[in-house]
Image: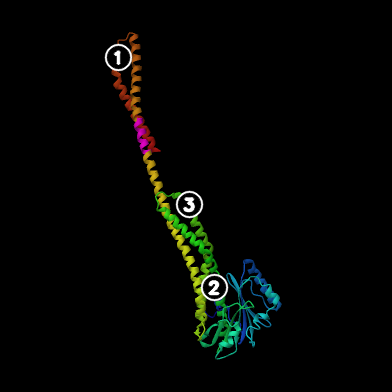
């Protein structure tokens, strides 16, 4: 793209990122209308099949298929419109039909979609919902609306600044779908599209947020068991006669179990919190005003969803806290074991030092005996040599020579041992 100003070259993703805000714009052409919404979980393999399945629908109606890397798609077919969005762990399909029937939900938008294509749709249904936007009406009669929801208690409010009223019962009806009824009071087409989108997102995100709740309930006994086991270990640590090595092994196993639970379920609990935040934001976007006699959508959801989410958050926080406590206990026990080992090593070194001193004293005693013995044998040799000289006629007295030689022998041997000690000392220092 050329410009009339001398500015630098465009970033490769500039226009893609700029136009992303327009990618999911409304495809509703007019009011009143009907919509059906499906949210499906799918595996990695089903994610690939889903794109191929959508391409088959486009081929059937002669429409261009979405791009290979597209994660959303909107199109208008013969009798209905479709919007497909692919998210991280689920996908949504929304089908729109213009016009209203005399009886809401009697002829939903999904009836316009080919049955064989619907039956082959990959994935598992998380949410299935119908919505109908009625023609303009100023004062909706709750008695007339209740039969559309099998006379269940109604939940509803005035929304979007008084432009419409929304009613539901948050129940799955005999057709397998939940229902939303929108009474148009002064809606523009764009407002109606945004309102439908928010209601469907509330339905989807609240279910996705609750996926963590069964996990939290399942983990509660494990959490209680781990907490009790940690108490048993810490209680045993207070007793001086405890087997620290055994306690450390038990604590290591407990830490491994807790970390396994934390790593296995962290993403699910984090996703639950994120989805709940999205539900809260969509409820704020509705700008609800109470209708006398019934609960608002936000009031109904918060009273029932918030305790479940708090349970999930509490379970996640307790596991995190338990992991930290196990870590602190493990550190304390390891410190205690290390101190015991250091005391044992100190006692061993003291014993080795005592043995070394005893060996040194014994060596000194042996050296003293050795000096006496060497002196004795050396003096004896000198005496033998002197007696030999005396026998040859030399005038020498063996007794005098032997007695005189003894001090010199002792001095010589002393210098010899000193030299040996000096050599040993130098050899040790070099090493």
**Considering only order in the chain, which callout, 2 or 1, is on the residue closer to the N terminus?**
2
Q: Mark 3 — residue? A: 249
Whether residues under marks 3 and 1 lie with C-beta atoms below 8 angstroms apart, the answer is no
Residue 125 to residue 96: above or below: above
Q: Residue at x 52, y 59 (%)?
A: 260
Please state the horizontal and vertical placement of residue 194, each as a whole percent of the image: 56, 82
Residue span colored magenta: 352-363
Name the one closer to the observer, 170 or 198. 170
Q: Is residue 339 visible?
A: yes
Callout 2 crowding tier (Cα within 10 Å): few <14, some 14–19, many ≥20:
few
Name the one closer to the observer, 54 or 214. 214
Left/right of residue 158 with respect to residue 124 in the rendered view: left
Q: Mark 2 — residue? A: 11
Left/right of residue 111 with respect to residue 300 in the rendered view: right
Structural distance between the alpha carbons of marks 3 and 2? 57 Å
Callout 3 crowding tier (Cα within 10 Å): few <14, some 14–19, many ≥20:
few
Residue 358: say if magenta.
yes
Left/right of residue 340 with respect to residue 29 in the rendered view: left
Q: Mark 1 — residue? A: 399
Name the one closer to the observer, 272 or 141. 141
Callout 1 crowding tier (Cα within 10 Å): few <14, some 14–19, many ≥20:
few
Please state the horizontal and vertical placement of residue 112, each as a whole percent of the image: 68, 81
């Amino acid at each position: 793209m050329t410009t009339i100003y001398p500015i630098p070259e465009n970033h490769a993703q500039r226009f893609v990122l700029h136009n992303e805000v327009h990618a999911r714009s409304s495809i509703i052409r007019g009011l009143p209308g009907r919509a059906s919404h499906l949210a499906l979980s799918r595996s990695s393999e089903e994610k690939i099949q889903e794109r191929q399945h959508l391409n088959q629908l486009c081929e059937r109606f002669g429409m261009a298929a979405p791009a290979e890397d597209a994660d959303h798609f909107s199109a208008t077919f013969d009798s209905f419109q479709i919007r497909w969005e692919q998210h991280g762990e689920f996908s949504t399909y929304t089908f729109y039909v213009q016009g209203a029937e005399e009886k809401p939900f009697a002829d939903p938008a999904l009836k316009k979609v080919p049955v064989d294509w619907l039956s082959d749709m990959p994935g598992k249904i998380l949410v299935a919902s119908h919505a109908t936007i009625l023609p303009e009406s100023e004062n909706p009669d709750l008695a007339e609306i209740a039969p559309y929801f099998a006379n269940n208690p109604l939940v509803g409010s005035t929304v979007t600044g008084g432009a419409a009223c929304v009613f539901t019962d948050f129940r799955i009806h005999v057709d397998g779908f939940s229902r939303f009824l929108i009474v148009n009071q002064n809606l523009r087409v764009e407002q109606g599209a945004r309102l439908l989108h928010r209601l469907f997102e509330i339905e989807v995100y609240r279910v996705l947020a609750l996926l963590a709740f069964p996990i939290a309930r399942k983990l509660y006994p494990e959490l209680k068991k781990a907490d009790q086991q940690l108490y048993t270990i810490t209680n045993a640590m207070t007793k001086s006669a405890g087997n620290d090595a055994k306690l450390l092994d038990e604590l290591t196993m407990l830490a491994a179990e807790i970390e396994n639970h934390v790593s296995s379920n962290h993403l699910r609990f984090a996703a639950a919190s994120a989805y709940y935040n999205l539900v809260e934001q969509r409820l704020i976007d509705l700008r609800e005003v109470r209708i006398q006699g019934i609960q608002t959508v936000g009031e109904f959801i918060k009273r029932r969803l918030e305790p479940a989410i708090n349970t999930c958050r509490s379970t996640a926080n307790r596991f995190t806290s338990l992991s930290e406590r196990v870590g602190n206990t493990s550190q304390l026990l390891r410190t205690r074991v290390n101190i015991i080992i250091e005391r044992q090593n100190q006692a061993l070194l003291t014993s080795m030092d005592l043995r070394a001193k005893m060996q040194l004293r014994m060596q000194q005693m042996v050296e003293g005996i050795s000096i006496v013995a060497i002196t004795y044998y050396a003096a004896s040799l000198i005496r033998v040599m002197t007696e030999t000289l005396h026998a040859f006629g030399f005038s020498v007295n063996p007794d005098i020579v032997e007695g005189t030689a003894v001090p010199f022998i002792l001095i010589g041997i002393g210098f010899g041992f000193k030299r040996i000690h000096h050599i040993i000392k130098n050899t040790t220092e070099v090493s």
